[in-house]
Image (cartoon, coloured by chain):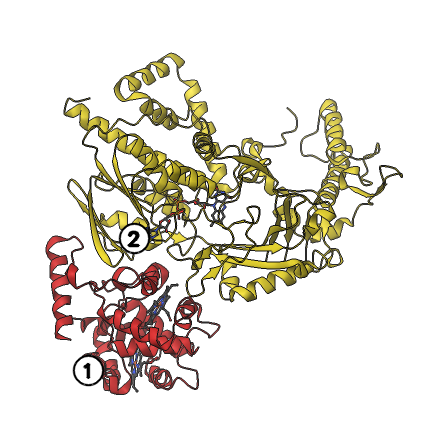
Amino acid sequence: MAFVIAGPTRLHGTNVGPQLQTLLIHQIRSIERHHMKKHLSRRRFLNLVGAAGGSTAVYKTSMALGLMQDTGPVAQLDLQKAGRNGKKVAVLGAGIAGLTVAYELERAGYDVTVIEASKRLGGRNLTVRHGDIIDELGQPQVCNFDDDPDLYFNCGPARIPGHHRRVLHYCKELKVPLQVKANMSRPAYTHEEGKFDDKPVRVGRYTADARGFMSELLHKAVDKNAFDQPLSAEDRERMLQFATAYGDLDPNGIYKGTIRAGYKSGGFITPAEHYTPMDFSALLDSKFWERGMTLSENPDWGEPLMEVTGGMDGLIKGLVRNISSPITTNAQVQSISLKENGVDVVYNHKGEREKLSVDYCFNSIPSHFMSGIPNNLPAEYRKGLASLQPGNFFKIGLQMKERFWENEGIYGGITNTSQKINQIWYPSHGIHGKKGVVLGAYAFFRQSAFFERMSPAARIEFAGKCGDKIHKGYSGYIEAGISVPWGRMNHMMGCGADWSPEIREKYYKLLQQPAGGRHFMIGDQISYHSSWQEGAFGSAEYALLELDKRVRAASARSGKG
Amino acid sequence: MQNQIRCWLLAIILLCVSGAPVFAENELPIPTDDLAYCSTCHGVQLMGNPILKAPRLSGMESWYIENQLQSFKKGWRGTHEGDVVGMEMRPMAAALSDEQINQAAEYVSATRSALPASSVVGDIDKGKVLFTTCGACHGQSAEGDPAFGSPMLTTVDDWYLVTQLKNFKSGIRGSHPGDIYGMQMRASTQLLTDEQAIMDVVSYISTLRK
Ligand SMILES: Cc1cc2nc3c(=O)[nH]c(=O)nc-3n(C[C@H](O)[C@H](O)[C@H](O)COP(=O)(O)OP(=O)(O)OC[C@H]3O[C@@H](n4cnc5c(N)ncnc54)[C@H](O)[C@@H]3O)c2cc1C
């Protein structure tokens, strides 16, 4: 081929983060490597593994060999049954990871107890409705939305993409209803202070112009044959066609605007009027192309996304519905002692100190709290936990007395702005209802501090003022509002763990392994998808398979297997 | 006080013997729901959590805790724009009534935990010389003196002593006109001419821990 457009790494989407990219490359390489080996012997190898360790072992081995993608079918966790004197297990933390372990181990016959510090279940999976408490440290709030099943706000997780196989597996198994959620939306806006006369621009228009301009440039470059290596006549022709189609250029390769930018007026009873292209240098001078424009090209935000009907906490309710083991809330863990044949967990509950002696402990407590909980875990393990810094997010939910955005042709999706609120999300459910809850701000990592320092009322006021610059009369529609600073939430103080590549290299494998074969660290913090439920489910699955491996090995040794 | 020291020793001895976290369980206070919040940041028994920059408070004198909670509440601490860490603490104190501050102080001083390992390295001998001035208010064994509003310095983490000395020196702490004690302490940091002097004096204070 005369003209190489992209190397192997770029084949997987332009907006893949470096970590994900490494992951993908790693997977592809390992699949390639194994394809080069003899198929028969590989199959035989797996058969041998299956004979020795059951289907979970085959699954795990397949994953390790790179034969099965991490996003492929979910393991059928045929955990070895615990027998009549079910082994005792303590699960620390009742978020996604903890509840998943409880659900699976209970089904395998273990004697499970869940210990949760907070008054509520779910951890970061939090949906608030009328009257719910938002347990922010120092300034707790009560949700003042109307008492209406459509008026809820997902304070934590809100989106599920199709390749998060574990999340979807549990939704299916637990009969948790899902619906499609709009994410990227062409009628929504991009708004940047000081750009485009401070006016919001429709995402569709911006994107069409950006692609049009780029395509025109590509067309010109091909025309002039401005490449290091000359193009063959055939490639040239195809490139010109590609540029024309991609940017909707005119027959001369010039971008003169496109229907893709949306109708300026008419188009139904009267003739359509199209937008003329915006000024190219103004577009370059803006920032939406930096991230917002291509966001949904990242698989985790790739259309179409899903959400749990009625609120994301439907997933927690689904798990809890199917767990009959005791779950104790209001029970903060006080110490964890690893012993030769088990683990002792001490916790406070209703003014008493309680001790639980178990065979295995599954711990989803955020790693940044472990430095404040007395424990005797191995020194390296503790160092690893202490090397993780908490991530952080901040969200505002606003109850609007009218669904004014629908009058602007917006049904779900996201508006981006350069203001500190970053985004406005329009609900995908309750369309044409009277009211709706919009996301009025979403700050990421360090940006959250700005909002954390404000009172809840000041945050709502600030969000209203920012919204006014995008939608006329926005703040006037606000009837009620709540804010959720994850870095200030009780028993949370952050979201997920921030792994630098060096820390990952040094501690990830160690923290994935059970300390003393007894204490399993779980949670999205022990995954490559921190701050995603898929990471939490994945960590639980990984730990359960590790446990199963040990249990099977032990019963094989004692001849009971 | 006697009782306190006994608990301390017991805890430390038990810890040393077993290597596991064993404490004189029946003497560990269990917080009410309101005060359980403190341990989210300050750790179990307020043992401190360096990742959250929340210092160890176990066994601190109740009068000093009260002073500090008031100081946060009044905005003498945790309002300076450079005091991002103090801002983490301030909303907690601001939400407490005087009565609750009283209860909090009692609870905090009753908590027990093992002394944290020292992490600050400095010239202990130079630190000792510097400390003679400090001792005038804090006592020569850094045991504190309520008459001067000067706290015991041997119970908090050494990294926390360093950040506080830097805060005093830069005026992040002890600048508010109402904060008489803070201003007195701030004036005393003139003696500590550079960061090394801070490390030196703190490494000496660590040797005074019992
Ligand atoms: C703003 C935001 C947006 C997000 N968006 C998405 C999204 O769109 N899609 C998606 O899939 N994911 C999303 N996530 C991530 C998702 O919420 C998490 O990955 C998932 O909920 C983590 O579950 P977990 O069980 O690992 O941890 P957690 O839910 O954090 O559970 C830990 C539990 O431990 C408890 N605990 C703490 N201390 C103690 C103690 N001392 N003793 C006992 N228990 C204790 C806590 O109270 C908590 O219940 C988002 C998160 C946030 C914050």
Image location (x, y in percent) of residue A116: 33, 49
Image location (x, y in percent) of residue A227: 69, 34
Q: What number is the disc on residue B140?
A: 1
Give the SS element for disc 2: loop
**Disc 2 residue type (three-letter):** Ala
Mark 2 lies within 8 Å of ligand 1 (Cβ measured) = yes
Image location (x, y in percent) of residue A462: 60, 64
Chain B as rendered: colour: red
Chain seen in yellow: A
Where B34 falls versus A341 (above or below)?
Answer: below
Looking at the image, which is closer to me, A383 or B59? B59
The residue lying at 55 percent from left, 46 percent from top is: A149
Marks 2 and 1 in Cβ contact (< 8 Å)? no
Horizontally, is A496 left or right of A109 in the view? right
> How many dots with numbers?
2
Residue placed under numbered mark 2 in the picture = A331
